[in-house]
């Protein structure tokens, strides 16, 4: 089952460190912009998607792909949508992931 990945929010160094920011050349993720959309089919990293971010969120994509019941019962309460983020500390990106239904 394909999973749609949408860039929900990109955080800047200032968002994360609130005035105590170390100096980094990139203030926001240089790879993704809010609103970017990708489709992961067969749990593979979509073309143009950051491979490091995909490694961070792949377990969540797999759970959506296979409609893993324990995951939904505990965290999503039956919804097929989740919000997850990459783990880069300087400027994380929050992704909305949705199972694309064939129903």
Image (cartoon, rainbow, N blue to C red):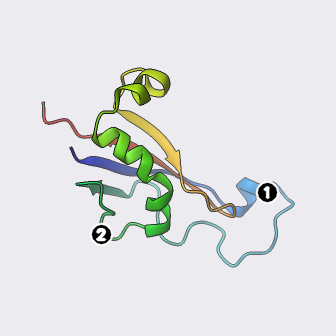
Left/right placement of residue 2 relative to residue 34 reads left
Residue 77 image point, x, y percent: 42, 20
Q: CA distance from mark 1 to mark 2?
A: 31 Å
* Residue at mark 2: 47
Left/right placement of residue 80 relative to residue 93 reads left
> Does residue 5 lie above or below 74 as drawn?
below
* Residue at mark 1: 17
Q: Quadrant of residue 35?
A: bottom left
> Does residue 8 lie above or below 22 as drawn?
above
Q: Quadrant of residue 98?
A: top left
Which class describes the residues within 10 Å of circle 2: few (<14), some (14-19), or many (20+)? few
**Quadrant of the rendering where the C terminus is positioned:** top left
Q: Secondary structure at mark 2?
A: loop
Q: Secondary structure at mark 1?
A: helix
Left/right placement of residue 46 relative to residue 76 reads left
Residue drawn 81% across the image and 54% down it: 18
């Amino acid at each position: 089952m394909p999973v749609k990945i949408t860039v929900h929010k990109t955080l800047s160094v200032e968002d994360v460190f609130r005035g105590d920011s170390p100096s980094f050349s990139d203030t926001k993720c240089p790879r993704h912009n809010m609103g970017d959309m990708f489709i992961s089919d067969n749990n593979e990293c979509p073309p143009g998607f950051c491979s490091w971010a995909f490694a961070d969120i792949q377990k969540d994509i797999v759970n959506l792909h296979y409609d893993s019941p324990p995951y939904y019962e505990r965290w999503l309460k039956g919804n097929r949508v989740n919000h997850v983020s990459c783990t880069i500390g300087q400027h994380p990106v929050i992704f909305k992931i949705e199972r694309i239904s064939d129903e």
